[in-house]
Amino acid sequence: MNETIRSIMQRSSTRAYTGEAVPPEKITVLKAAALAAPTAINKQENRFVFVTDKDLLAKVNEKTYEVMVAESDNEGIALLEQRKAEDIFYNSPLVIFIYSQDSYYAAMDAGIAVQNLALAAHALGLGSCINGRCRRAFNREFEGNLCSTLGFAEDEEFRIAIGIGHIDKDKEPHTFDYSHIREIK
Ligand SMILES: Cc1cc2nc3c(=O)[nH]c(=O)nc-3n(C[C@H](O)[C@H](O)[C@H](O)COP(=O)(O)O)c2cc1C
């Protein structure tokens, strides 16, 4: 099978990492993969923060939990418990946060970039898990949100994040439901 198709088919979310750091040469490739993503009208408004600072990731984790509790997100808290998650990033040594100014396609541009990162990580022999849960840490309605800590300007918003690292425990790719596809010929 073609390498690209194999990566698309075999990628799955990793929720257990060894903790080993992602080597700089792989981080360089991931940066290029992020910037290679297509954007509407080639506006390239995605911005990326590559974070390996454990203390900062712990802060994002803490703030996310704080907001989950404030919002009584019992389902989310129970899911993390059920997954035996040490933290919302499952101990991934690298988390990439994508943010941008508001625009009609901002979420879509970020979604495409995050999948580029997931596939690039897979191709580099690394695991990844997209993370939307941490958006709570950047909710401007909550005092002490971490927007400025991560360097977002007033008019920039969190879109999505992805944790990346060496796989400790792998998971099978999810099953496909072909009934979700219709053809009109
Ligand atoms: C927009 C988006 C947000 C997600 N947020 C989280 C998250 O916060 N935590 C998590 O463990 N997985 C998260 N995921 C991963 C999904 O749960 C996962 O992709 C799905 O269960 C299918 O499994 P697979 O990635 O192994 O195919 C997210 C995925 C997407 C696309």
Image (cartoon, rainbow, N blue to C red):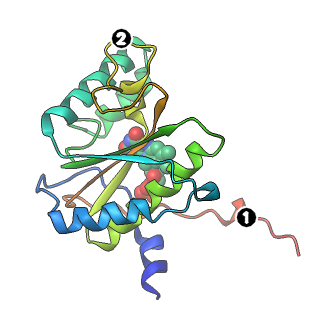
Identity of the residue drawn at 51% across and 54% down = 44
Q: Is residue 159 left or right of residue 137?
A: right
- Mark 1 or mark 2: name the one nearer the start of the chain: 2
Q: Which residue is mark 1?
A: 181
Foreground: 154 or 19? Answer: 154
Image location (x, y in percent) of residue 144: 31, 14
Left or right: 136 as drawn, with respect to 89? right
Pointer 2 local density, CA inside 10 Å: few below 14, some 14–19, many at least 20: few
Q: Are marks 1 and 2 in contact (CB under 8 Å)?
A: no
| Mark 1 neighbour density, 10 Å: few (under 14) some (14–19) many (20 or more) | few
Left or right: where 91 falls relative to 158: left
Q: Tell me the distance, in whole angstroms, between the alpha carbons under discs 1 and 2.
A: 44 Å
Task: State whether residue 156 is above or below residue 62.
Answer: below
Residue type, label 2: Glu
Secondary structure beneath label 2? loop
Q: Position of residue 65 (x, y in %)?
A: 31, 23
- Residue at x-position 30% and y-position 40%: 83
Q: Looking at the image, is 148 positioned above or below residue 66? A: below
* Disc 1, SS: loop
Ligand 1 within 8 Å of disc 2? The answer is no
Amino acid at the residue labelled 1 = Ile
Q: Which residue is mark 2?
A: 143
